[in-house]
Amino acid sequence: GAVVSQHPSRVICKSGTSVKIECRSLDFQATTMFWYRQFPKQSLMLMATSNEGSKATYEQGVEKDKFLINHASLTLSTLTVTSAHPEDSSFYICSAKRTPSQPQHFGDGTRLSIL
Amino acid sequence: AQSVTQPDIHITVSEGASLELRCNYSYGATPYLFWYVQSPGQGLQLLLKYFSGDTLVQGIKGFEAEFKRSQSSFNLRKPSVHWSDAAEYFCAVAAISSGSARQLTFGSGTQLTVLP
């Protein structure tokens, strides 16, 4: 089955640090990748949609300069949280699709803790 | 805009009992509907999906869901719950966005506790 790998699974860092999260589709080429954020005890909120070779489409209220998304290849998308602060602490999950008509396959998520 | 409502925040059932998790959606066109399960601290696993055709959909781990257009519902069921089913369950609807990529809108989730 389709496998999506997300790395790292957990990161703890100091306020002001920039953190990069990778999302890889291991056995398929993903035309589209999505980034979600999940607050404790809450549902997943879509942050942005990433298409290979083009700029990401951000949801309303998501700061583009804060959450940098790069989708440089059909198997890799990265989310960089720049100058992270404690309020950025959250669980970030990526997903990938082979084609628009197929279901999303999710990574295992990254627990980000900013001290 | 599409939306998904999961009325039950938390459900507790005994092992071996039947289970039904409710999901109601609001969407202007024919919906693409999904159920995902999330174990603590992990990503999401697709249980089943409905695109078209038979309104009773079979999924993995013994789960099934029934699409009822008249009630705008897509409830998840399992005849006999196992302790390993304890997790959080999310219902989702796919929307058409620019570029034809289908984004997911999630419900707020239902936390399932299974008693021994």
Image (cartoon, coloured by chain):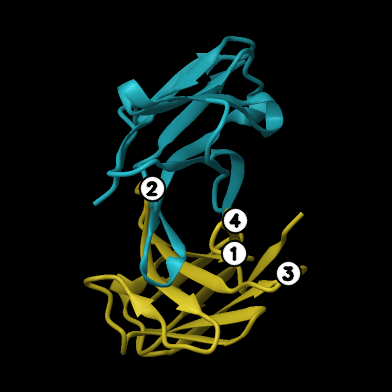
> Which chain letter matches label 1?
A
Q: How crowded is mark 1: few (under 14 residues within 10 Å), some or many (20 or more)?
A: many
Q: Which chain carries label 3?
A: A
Q: Which chain is drawn using yellow?
A: A
The answer as to whether the residues below labels 2 and 4 share one chain is no
Secondary structure at numbered mark 3: loop
Question: At 31% from the left edge and 89% from the top edge, which residue is drawn?
Answer: A65
Mark 4 lies on a secondary structure that is loop
On screen, residue A83 versus residue A12, left or right, reads left
Which colour is chain B painted? cyan
Q: In this view, does B75 lie above or below A5?
A: above
Measure the C-alpha gap from mark 3 to mark 4.
12 Å
Q: Do the numbered discs 4 and 1 sit on residues whose CB atoms are within 8 Å?
A: yes
Q: In this view, does B27 lie to the left or right of A3?
A: left
Disc 1 with disc 3 on a shared chain: yes
**Spatial separation of the CA atoms under disc 4 and disc 1:** 6 Å
Mark 2 vs mark 4, foreground winner is 4
The residue that disc 4 covers is A102
**Foreground pick, A37 / A34:** A34
Question: Type of residue at label 3?
Answer: Phe
Q: Is mark 2 on a helix, strand or loop?
A: strand
- Mark 1 or mark 4, which is nearer the start of the sequence? 1
Q: Residue A28 carries which label?
A: 3
Q: Where is residue A92 in the image (x, y as percent from the top left)?
A: 46, 66
Q: Which mark is residue B106?
A: 2
| Mark nearer the viewer, 3 or 2 | 3
Q: Do the residues labelled 1 and 3 touch (CB within 8 Å)?
A: no
Q: Foreground residue, B108 or A56?
A: A56
Q: Residue at x 60, y 65 (%)?
A: A99
